[in-house]
Structure formats: C-alpha cells, structure tokens
C-alpha cells in the first residue's frame, strides 16, 4: 500500500489536499503578519503610553535589560500569538501521533477561527493578548499536522514540491494581510479598521473546516496504528537527538530573524522614516501598509514559489544553506553601509526585501519540510512539533525584544545580530542536517548514515539497497 503512494505522481487528491491544508497556512500567515499593519493602530487605540499600560512602572527589567514598559507592551502584543504557537505545536504534535492526524486537522483550524473572531471584539489589552495567545495555539498546532499529512500522502519524486506548495500559501496570507490592511486603513475609521483586520482571519479558516473533516487518515499512520502497534512503543525520541538539534535549532534561528523583522516591518519602516507623515497617523499607517504590501508581493511571495520549483531538484539542505548565506550577507551589508542606505531608502528596502526572498527560497520552506522526513511515522508529528514549537519560541522572543533592541541599539546593531544568527543557521545546517530528496520516508527517517557530518544521503540509498 505504501509503495503505491511512494510511486504516485501528482493526483487530484494531492491538489485537493494542497488547497485545504494550504488554506490553513494562508490563515496562519494572515493572522500573524497582519499585526504588522494593525500594531501601530492598537498602540494608539488602547492608549499604550507610559501612564497607561499593563505594567506597573515606566521601566521594566527584562532579560537583564532596563527597558520602557511601553516598548515591552508593544513587543508583547506582537509576539503573544507566537508564544501560543510554541505551546500549540508541542501539544498538537504529540496528540496527532497518539490520536491521528485527521482529528487534530479539524481541531486546530476550529481554534484559529474562533479566536480570530474573539480577538476582533477585544475591549482591552489583556483580552486581546489572551485571545491572540489561544489563536496562536491553533496556528502552532497546524504546523506539524498539515505538513505531516501532506508528506505521508505524497510520492517520492514530488513530496518536496507538494509540501512546499502547502507552505507557499503562507505567501498569499502575507499579501492578503497587507492588502486588507491597506483597504481597511484607507476606507474605515481606525477604531474599526484594526477589528476588521484581525477578524478577517476567521474567513479562510472557516471556509475549509468541513473539507478537512472529510479527509481520510494517512496510510502510514493507519499501518502503524493497526498493523504495527508495538512499534509505537519501541521508537524512542531520545535516539533522534541529532535530527532534533538540526531541525529545531535551524528553525529556531531562522524564525528569530524572519518573524522578528516581518511582524515588526511597520516599526522598521517607521524607524527609517519611510512613509512618515508628521501629525497624520492615518497617512503614516497607510504608507506603512503599502510598504508591507510591496515587500510581500515583490519579494516574499516569489520566494515561496521558487522553492516549490527547485526543492526536489536542488535539495532541502542546499537551499537551506543558501538561504541562510544570503540572509547573512544582506544583514551585514545593511549594518556596515547603513548611513549611506538612509539616503537611498529604496535601496535599503530592496536589500531588506532580498533577505525575505532568499529566506523563503531556503530555510523558511526547508525547515517546514525536513521534520516530516527526518522522523519516523511513530513520532513524526511529535518531532515536527518540537521543531516548529522551538521555532515559534525563538520567533516570539525576538519579536518581543526587537522594539527594545532597536530603541536601545539602533538598526545597524540589529542587523549585526541578525547576520550572526544567520551564520549560526548556516553552520548548523551543514553539520546537523542530511539531504532527504528522492528517498522514501522510511529511508529519510532511518538513523543509518546520520552522523555529525551529515552531508549525504542515507546509507541504504548510497549502497543501492532497499
């Protein structure tokens, strides 16, 4: 039965699953990144100032830094959903290995729909943060479940393409969030605009809940559950410490850079003076929304689809290393030529956009795929949950800290930090990730040949044995 799926091409079933899984990721991206436009409005709407915030004093000590409580609250608004995703990925990843992919496939999307609506009707900062946290739990749960379900149904030759097509829907979510932001700010009162932006995330997720409920359980999970139940007790996660280090570590590093900047794009653009209209918050926010839309359409979306077209030919490891390399180069160039780039703001935005382009071609896509291939069926969503949960913790931490880093250290030092993070991702990719293209899942998840210098394919494939 598994051989039939491994040999298959791209069928109508695969395309249908790309759509209903991908709509979850479109929603994930929309819910997370629409805050880039909504955040300046929320700060103004809820009156987040030194005399009115959820913290008790003007200065707060956090991770050894003495920072403004206003800045910390802005960072928390932007990052709270990511901390929810950190919890959700671990919880839903483990539950999907115990109870099946199909059940969790519906539950996580239902949570996202409900709490997107609740967040839109929030009447206070604590209520908004609570609803965004639970929204994030649903988002986090969608990562291990949707990716694994698509991977376990895919044939060998097209697995990377199909799983990356699911993830590429995130690019349309980014673009949709930017466009909804532009239209909302342009035509609605700001007090209504942010509610529309947050609440609209419920629409795409609600649209496919029914279709997800009709998807069959994956063949590999059925085999493990019914024909090899004893195998579930024998597979030990501790034996997979190197794949955990490689997948969770590289994804953690990437998300620190990617989410920290993406969700705070508005803050970065404002800090540079892009689109700022003194005394006119609506015009300023509209300009920032347009800037976000340009970055998404010109750089982010093409990056996802370049990955779709190349991942099964070039390979996961090569693309991941390449993406980290270009990101590091871009960040260091911005850091060392910052003053000159301020006089050529569109050159800055172009370089900044290139970091998103190659981030999406490489580690943003590959870190999503690799955990579905490097862990066996018995612990596949658990392993993916650990990797994606760790990533969202890194994303949440850096998103929380980025406003404070920018305020205290400036953009050049921020870029030096991002460049150093990217270099660390390059090194970890080289030493703790093995290539998985053109292999069966049972081969990619085998520990044979998975040494510290994991440059090649598994031992079984090298020797020609099956």
Image (cartoon, grey):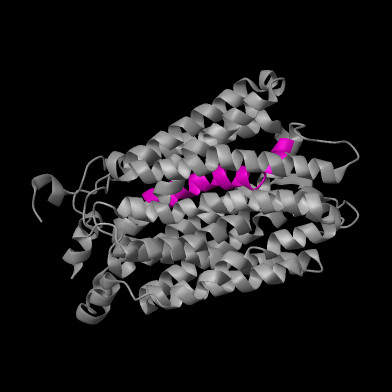
Q: Position of residue 278 (x, y in %)?
A: 88, 36
Looking at the rendering, in which quadrant would you find the C terminus?
A: bottom left
Above or below, 413 relative to 183: above
Horizontal side of 271 relative to 84 (left or right) equals: right
Horizontal side of 353 relative to 102 (left or right) equals: right
Magenta span contains residue 245: yes
The residue lying at 75 percent from left, 54 percent from top is 184
Magenta span contains residue 226: no
Looking at the rendering, in which quadrant would you find the N terminus?
A: bottom left
Horizontal side of 20 relative to 188 (left or right) equals: left
- What segment carries the magenta color? 244-269
Q: Report which quarter residue 349 is drawn in.
A: top right
The residue lying at 83 percent from left, 55 percent from top is 190
The residue lying at 73 percent from left, 66 percent from top is 120
Asked if residue 74 can be seen in this view, the reply is no
Q: Report which quarter residue 52 is drawn in.
A: bottom right
Task: Report the predominant secondary structure element of the magenta stretch.
Answer: helix
Above or below, 150 relative to 457: below
The residue lying at 49 percent from left, 40 percent from top is 302
């Amino acid at each position: 039965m598994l051989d039939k799926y491994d040999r298959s091409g791209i069928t109508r079933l695969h395309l249908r699953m790309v759509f209903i899984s991908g709509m979850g990721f479109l929603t994930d991206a929309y819910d997370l990144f629409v805050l880039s436009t909504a955040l300046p409005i929320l700060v103004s709407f809820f009156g987040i100032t030194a005399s009115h915030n959820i913290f008790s004093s003007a200065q707060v000590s956090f991770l050894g830094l003495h920072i403004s409580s206003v800045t910390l609250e802005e960072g928390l608004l932007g990052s709270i959903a990511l901390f929810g995703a950190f919890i959700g990925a671990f919880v839903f990843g483990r539950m999907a290995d115990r109870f099946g992919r199909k059940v969790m496939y519906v539950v996580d999307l239902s949570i996202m729909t409900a709490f997107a609506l609740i967040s839109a009707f929030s009447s206070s900062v604590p209520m908004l943060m609570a609803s965004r946290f639970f929204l994030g739990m649903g988002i986090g749960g969608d990562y291990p479940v949707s990716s694994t379900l698509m991977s376990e149904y895919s044939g060998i030759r097209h697995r990377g393409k199909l799983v990356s097509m699911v993830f590429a829907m995130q690019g349309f979510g980014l673009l949709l969030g930017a466009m909804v932001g532009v239209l909302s700010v342009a035509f609605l009162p700001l007090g209504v605009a942010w509610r529309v932006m947050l609440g609209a995330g419920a629409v795409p997720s609600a649209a496919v809940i029914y279709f997800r409920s009709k998807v069959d359980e994956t063949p590999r999970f059925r085999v493990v559950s019914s024909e090899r139940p004893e195998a579930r007790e024998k597979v030990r996660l501790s034996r997979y410490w190197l794949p955990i280090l490689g997948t969770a570590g590289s994804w953690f590093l990437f998300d620190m850079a990617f989410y920290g900047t993406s969700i705070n794009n508005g803050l970065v653009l404002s800090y540079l003076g892009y689109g700022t209209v003194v005394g006119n918050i609506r015009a300023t926010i509209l300009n920032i929304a347009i800037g976000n839309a340009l970055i998404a359409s010109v750089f982010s979306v093409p990056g996802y689809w370049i990955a779709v077209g190349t991942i099964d030919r070039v390979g996961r490891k090569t693309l991941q290393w390449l993406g980290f390399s270009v990101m590091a180069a871009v960040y260091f160039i911005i850091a060392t030529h910052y003053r000159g780039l301020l006089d050529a703001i569109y050159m800055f935005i172009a370089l900044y956009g290139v970091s998103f382009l190659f981030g999406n071609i490489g580690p943003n896509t590959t870190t999503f795929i690799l955990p579905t291939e490097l862990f066996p069926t018995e612990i596949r969503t658990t392993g993916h949950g650990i990797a994606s949960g760790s990533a969202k913790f890194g994303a949440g931490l850096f998103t929380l800290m980025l406003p404070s880093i920018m305020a205290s250290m400036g953009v050049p030092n921020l870029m030096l930090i991002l460049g150093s993070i990217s270099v660390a991702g390059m090194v970890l990719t080289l030493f703790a990730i093995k290539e998985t293209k053109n292999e069966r899942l049972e081969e990619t998840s085998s520990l044979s040949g998975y040494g510290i210098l994991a440059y090649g394919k598994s031992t079984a494939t090298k020797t020609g044995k099956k």
